[in-house]
């Protein structure tokens, strides 16, 4: 068995915008490429074959970013009613508090919650058999895509917090079985495993541009992810638009 990692962010403007609900809104390249917490999550997932929930080991990997693993009860204590939209089945909740400055120079506390779930609406299987194979060798790809969410908050006027941005990234585990005719009447195969990521805009920080007056949608999530391996498009998987 071979194993390879493809931690990939789509960089062309056309590809970036194709996953957005409102393609007329354009964001700078940095909105798609600057996500240190997202990169750390993707790296951790790529090094652990099984997703175990809750995953306490992830906290060690993300502690340098001020991220901690928290329970449902802790989320309710910190976010109040806003927490209900975040909660789901078989989830790991990662929580961070960042401090920003408002237009008057006053500090603002901004919680962020990263949600990794193995629930059915976040665990999306797909299979692909690329066309134009020559008959002596052919590939089959089996893909599982996880929709990793980030919820970002600002203080509400009446106390508590309001969610001002919901972003995500797609993390895919890919098994490629290559079949080939080794001799007349005999078919052999090899298995190669990959991981692949594609980020929506502002996965880590939609707060800074909003405070600077940038028009940032509240829902930034990808609608689908296109799997590309070694420059070859394998297929596209639609993502859940549930909470």
Image: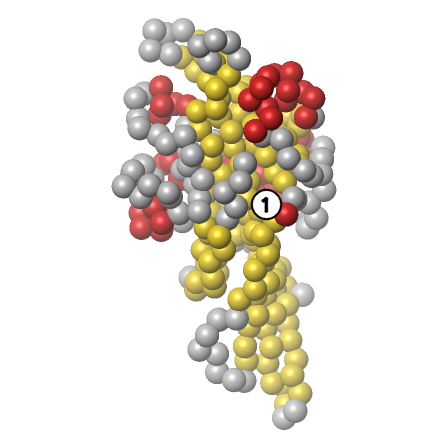
Residue 184, image x, y percentages: 63, 93
On-image quarter of the N terminus = bottom right
> Where residue 214 sits: x, y (%)?
30, 26
Residue 42 rendering spot, x and y as whole percentages: 56, 42
State the count of labels. Answer: 1
Give the residue at x 57% y 29%.
85
Residue 19 visible to the viewer: yes
Residue at (44% x, 10% y) in the render:
157
Quadrant of image for the C terminus:
top right
Between residue 58 and residue 225, name the one nearer to us: 225
- Placement of 105 over or under 76, stated as above or below: above
Q: Nearer the viewer, residue 23 or 139?
A: 23
Element under label 1? helix
Outermost residue on the bottom side: it is: 184
Crowd tier of the residue under label 1, counting other residues whose Cα lies within 10 Å: few below 14, some 14–19, many 20 or above:
many
- Point 47% across, 35% down: residue: 167
Q: Is residue 40 visible?
A: no
Examine the image and state in which quarter residue 200 appears.
top left
Side of 231 where 173 appears, left or right: right
Tell me where residue 130 appears, x and y as whole percent.
Answer: 48, 71
Height in image: 217 above or below 174? above
Furthest toward the left, the residue is 24
> Residue at position x 46%, y 74% from top?
131
Q: Is residue 102 left or right of residue 8?
A: left
List the residue tagged with mark 1: 122
Residue 154 higher or lower than 243, as above or below? above
């Amino acid at each position: 068995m071979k194993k390879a990692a493809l931690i990939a962010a789509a960089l062309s403007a056309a590809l970036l915008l194709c996953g957005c609900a409102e393609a007329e809104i354009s964001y700078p390249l940095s909105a798609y490429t600057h996500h240190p917490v997202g990169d750390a999550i993707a790296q951790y997932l790529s090094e652990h074959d099984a997703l175990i929930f809750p995953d306490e080991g992830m906290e060690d990997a993300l502690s340098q970013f001020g991220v901690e693993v928290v329970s449902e009860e802790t989320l309710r204590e910190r976010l109040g009613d806003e927490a209900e939209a975040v909660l789901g089945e078989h989830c790991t909740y990662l929580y961070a508090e960042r401090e920003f400055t408002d237009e008057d120079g006053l500090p603002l506390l901004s919680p962020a919650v990263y949600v990794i779930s193995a629930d059915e609406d976040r665990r999306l299987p797909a299979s692909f058999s690329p066309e134009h194979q020559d008959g002596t060798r052919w590939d089959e790809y089996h893909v599982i895509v996880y929709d990793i969410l980030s919820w970002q908050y600002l203080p509400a006027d009446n106390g508590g917090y309001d969610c001002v941005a919901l972003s995500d990234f797609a993390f895919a585990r890919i098994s490629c079985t290559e079949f080939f005719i080794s001799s007349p009447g005999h078919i052999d195969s090899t298995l190669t495993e990959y991981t692949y990521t594609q980020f929506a805009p502002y996965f880590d920080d939609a707060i800074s541009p909003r405070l600077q007056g940038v028009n940032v949608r509240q829902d930034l999530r990808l609608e689908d992810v296109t799997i590309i391996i070694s420059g070859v498009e394998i297929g596209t998987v639609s993502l859940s638009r549930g909470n």
